[in-house]
Amino acid sequence: MKIEFVPSDAEVGKTGAIAVLAFEKTALAGAAAELDRQTGGALARAIAGGRFTGAQGQSLDLIAPHGIDAARVLIVGAGAEDKFDERTLELVAASAYQALKMSGAESLTLRLPGVAPAMAGHAALGARLAAYRFDKYRTKEKADKKPSIAKVRIAVDDPAAAKQASKGLDGLADAIVFARDLVSEPANVLYPEEFARRVKKLADLGLEIEILGEKEMKALGMGALLGVGQGSVRESQLAIIQWKGAKDPAKAPVAFVGKGVCFDTGGISIKPADGMEEMITDMGGAAAVAGAMAALAARKAKVNAVGILGLVENMPDGNAQRPGDVVKTMSGQTVEVINTDAEGRLVLADALWYCQDRFKPKLMIDLATLTGAIIIALGKDLGGMFCNDDALAENLMAASKASADALWRMPMPAQYEKQIESGVADMKNVGTRQGGSITAALFIQRFVNGLPWAHLDIASTAWKPASAVPTIPNGATGFGVRLLDRLVADFYED
C-alpha cells in the first residue's frame, strides 16, 4: 500500500474516500465542519441520527452525500480533544483504514488541516501498521476478499514538511514489518539457517552481523542451547548483531537477547496437536530483537547496542533430548531437563551468558515467548516484565507507556527458587505449575552474572489471532520493536 502526503484541500475523486476527525462533546470543526457545510448539514444529521459520540475508535461510514466528489465519507472518533496526541492520531488513522479497507474505495484521504508536520507522520505510521497483511502464500483469493484501499493520502497544510518529518518513522515501520514477517513465516520456510540469512541482510543498514553454527557453539560449551536443537535436522544458529552509534565505539553496549525457537513441537514432551500450528511464532522474541536493532540502525541511534538471537528448532526425533537428561551450560552450571517443552529458557541460558561474557554490556534485556502461564496471568494485552534492577524496570515501564507495547512488572520471590532445585544437577528447568512464569524467570536470572537485567515474557503479546487494536491486524504484532527503540531513545543514547 502506498502512503503519500498531499495538500489539505486535495481533490479525492469518485473512487476515493474521505476521512475526517470528530472529537467527543465538540461540535464539528475543521475538515469535518467544512464537509458538513458542503453537504448542507448531512454529516451533522447523520451523527444526530445515530449513536456516534466521537469516542476514540468509533466511526460513521456514509455514502458520500451530494456535493462531495468522493465515493464515501468516514467520520472517525478522536476522543477528547484535550487528550489528542501522536498516539491517538496513529489509532485514528488506523481505525479509518480498518473501517474502509473492504469498502471498495480505492484510496483513502485523511484530512488533517492544522495538524503539525511532525504529528502528521504518526498518521502515516498508523495507517501503514494497520495495512500490514501477510498474504504472500495466497494464490486464489477473490478480489472482494482483498482490501480495496491501495493508497492512503495524508492531507495536511504543508505536505513537504510532513513528508520530511515522517522519515524518522519510516525506519521504525520497516522494522516492525520485518519482525511481523519473520513471525508470520511458516516453519518449513523460516528455520534457523534461513532466519540467520535474513538477519544478514540487515548489514545494508550498517549493522555488523556474525553467525555462529553448531561447531562454534559446541566449542564454546553451549550444551543447553544445542540440546534443544539436537532432535532437528536443521542446524542451530547464534546470530550476533552489533550497532556502534555512540561517540565512543568502545563504550559498553545495551544488549538485547531473543529466544528464536523457529518451531516448537515440545520435543519428547510433545505438545497437544490442537493449536500447535501457532508454534511458528515461538521465535517472536528473536524477531523483536532483530527488528529493534534494525530500527536503531535506520535512525542512526547514538548508542552502542548488541542483539543476540538463539535460533533453534525443537523436534522429537530419535536424537532428541530426553526428559531426565543433564546438560552443561556455557556458564559451567548443569541443568536437569525435566520437560523438553521448557526449552526457551535453555536457549536463553547460553545466549545470555555468551552476551555478558563477550560484550560486557551495561544491561541485558531478553525477550521470549516463554510461558503459557503469563497468558493466564495477564491475558493477551500485557507482556510480563521480570527485573533485578529497579532503575531499569522504571525505564522499561516509561518506554512501555510511551510506545504502547504494554508491560506489567511481575515479582521474583526468592522462596520460589526451591521449585527449580534438582537432586542430580545444579538446577532443573521447570518447577511446579503454580507460578510457572516466575520460576522460569528465576531460572534465567542464574545466567546474567549479576548484570542489570530484565526478562520480558511476550507469549501473551507476540501473536494475536483476533486483535482489537487497529494498528495490529490479526496475527503477528511486532511487539517489542517499538518498546526497545523507545527505551534506547529516551534513556541510553549519547
Image (cartoon, rainbow, N blue to C red):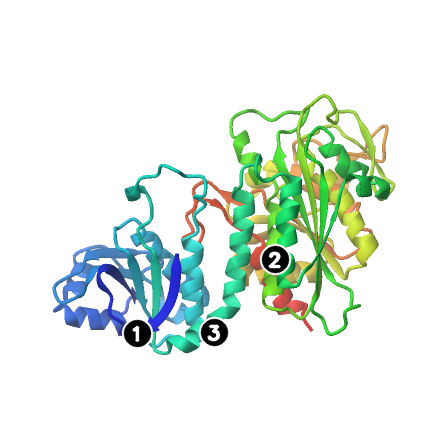
The amino acid pointed to by label 2 is Ala
What is the distance, in whole Å, between disc 2 and disc 3 at their CAs?
20 Å
Kindly tell me whether residue 116 is visible in this rendering: no
Quarter holding the C terminus? bottom right
Kindly tell me whether residue 134 is visible in this rendering: yes
- Reading the image, the residue beneath label 3 is 165
Mark 2: which secondary structure?
helix
- Reading the image, the residue beneath label 1 is 8
Crowding near the residue tagged with mark 3, few <14, some 14–19, many ≥20 C-alpha atoms within 10 Å: some
Mark 1: which secondary structure?
loop
Q: Is residue 67 left or right of residue 377?
A: left
Q: Which mark, by number, is residue 229?
A: none
Quarter holding the N terminus? bottom left
Task: Provide residue 202's location: percent of width, then percent of height.
Answer: 62, 56
- Reading the image, the residue beneath label 2 is 292
What is the distance, in whole Å, between disc 1 and disc 3 at their CAs?
17 Å
Question: Relative to residue 257, is residue 420 depicted above or below?
Answer: above
Kindly indicate the quadrant of the structure image that contains residue 65.
Answer: bottom left
**Depth check: 7 or 21 in front?**
7
Q: Residue at horizontal 66%, vertical 41%?
A: 193
Task: Provide residue 36's location: percent of width, then percent of height.
Answer: 18, 69
The amino acid pointed to by label 3 is Ala
The amino acid pointed to by label 1 is Ser
Q: Is residue 35 left or right of residue 243?
A: left
Task: Provide residue 159's location: percent of width, then percent of height.
Answer: 38, 75
First-in-chain label (1 vs 3): 1
